[in-house]
Amino acid sequence: MLFVPCCRIFEIPSFPFMASSSPTHLSLSLDPSSSTSLLNLQTQRTISGSNDFEKTHLRIPVSFRKKAANLQMMASGKTPGLTQEVTIDREDNADVSDDMKQRFLAFKKHKYMDNLEHFKKLADAQAPKQQFLVIACADSRVCPSAILGFQPGDAFTVRNIANLVPSYESGPTETKAALEFSVNTLNVENILIIGHSRCGGIQALMSMQGEGDSRSFIHNWVKVGKKAKESTKAVASNLHFDHQCQHCEKASINHSLERLLGYPWIEEKVRKGSLSLHGGYYDFVNCTFEKWTVDYGESRGKKEGSGIAVKNRSVW
């Protein structure tokens, strides 16, 4: 293991394990204005009385600069002040951008170029081959492509706070636009609403007093799910708040599925059998996924507003 001291540039002589006839110098170049760092390995060879140099550049993670800076501060015994903190934050941003760049280049090399014909077809038009519209939460822990393996071109996806579906009669939203486009233009055959554990949007809904703060965009949005909150309070008010939220997370999925049947062009396709509605619940605490399907025939016999009937429930 080679310990790298906290300095800008350093050199070391050759070690016994290096070629004895070839002195080797190692230098670390750190450019504060650059998002990259280079490890320069220089080997000197003597040929016919003259010196010949070979250089090898090894790229090391940019995050090394932050570690080196931290070690240097620790060695000096100084407490980092505001200036140092700002500098480190900028390096964090550089790390994030560099990581993003590397992930994109990896995608381009290993997925895009390996499936070039497929992506060329997608460039002309989309026709989700799995025939899904997915409505999921914007929570960073609940990415449908990651947990269900959807690939580019597989599913049309819209994400919002708490994976809610507003009523047909309410004003325009991006979720309603996505519903109209995917059902009437893309002709998807399935709509899947995915809820999840520890949903911050549902927690905001459950802790909201009355109609909430009218100035809050969050309150004005999550109150779309107030019927789920009311039904939860009716049956689970004696439970701990966390358990109430868990109940509401699932109840809100079914209330949103019921709302979908209030869209005339969705209800018509479901009635004709060309469109199916599904609910899903991702528990990322225990890594389980629960899925069910709306039973339209049984749901029609229920009193309006009394919920929906479901079938084919399974847990993965």
Image: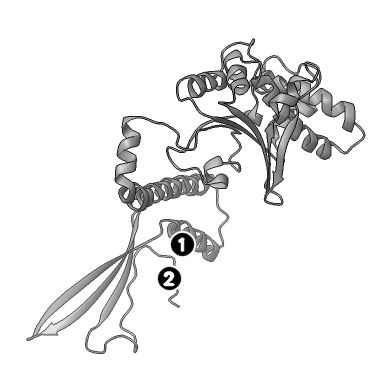
Q: Are marks 2 and 1 in contact (CB under 8 Å)?
A: yes
Q: In the image, what residue occupies the spot 55% across and 52% down? A: 80
Q: How is the image coloured?
A: one colour
Dividing the picture into quadrants, the one containing residue 195 is top right
Point out residue 107 in the picture as x, y percentages from the top left corner.
Answer: 38, 49
The residue identified by callout 1 is 68
- Compared to residue 7, the image places residue 163 above or below, namely above
Mark closest to the chain's N terminus, 2 or 1: 2
Point out residue 280 in the picture as x, y percentages from the top left corner.
Answer: 66, 38
Left or right? Give the position of 1 relative to 35: right
Point out residue 49 in the picture as x, y percentages from the top left corner.
Answer: 8, 86
Name the element at disc 1. Answer: helix
- Compared to residue 256, the image places residue 72 above or below, namely below
* Number of numbered callouts drawn: 2
Which residue is farthest left?
48
Crowd tier of the residue under label 1, counting other residues whose Cα lies within 10 Å: few below 14, some 14–19, many 20 or above: some
Which residue type carries mark 2? Val
Report the front residue among 63 and 126: 126
Report the front residue among 299 and 111: 299
Dividing the picture into quadrants, the one containing residue 194 is top right
Left or right? Give the position of 210 relative to 166: right
- Compared to residue 252, the image places residue 303 above or below, namely above
Report the front residue among 238 and 192: 192
Left or right? Give the position of 116 relative to 127: left
The residue identified by callout 2 is 4
Dividing the picture into quadrants, the one containing residue 176 is top right
Q: In the image, what residue occupies the spot 67% across and 51% down? A: 287
Q: In the image, what residue occupies the spot 73% across and 17% down? A: 213
Report the front residue among 11 and 291: 291
Which residue type carries mark 1? Ala
Crowd tier of the residue under label 2, counting other residues whose Cα lies within 10 Å: few below 14, some 14–19, many 20 or above: few
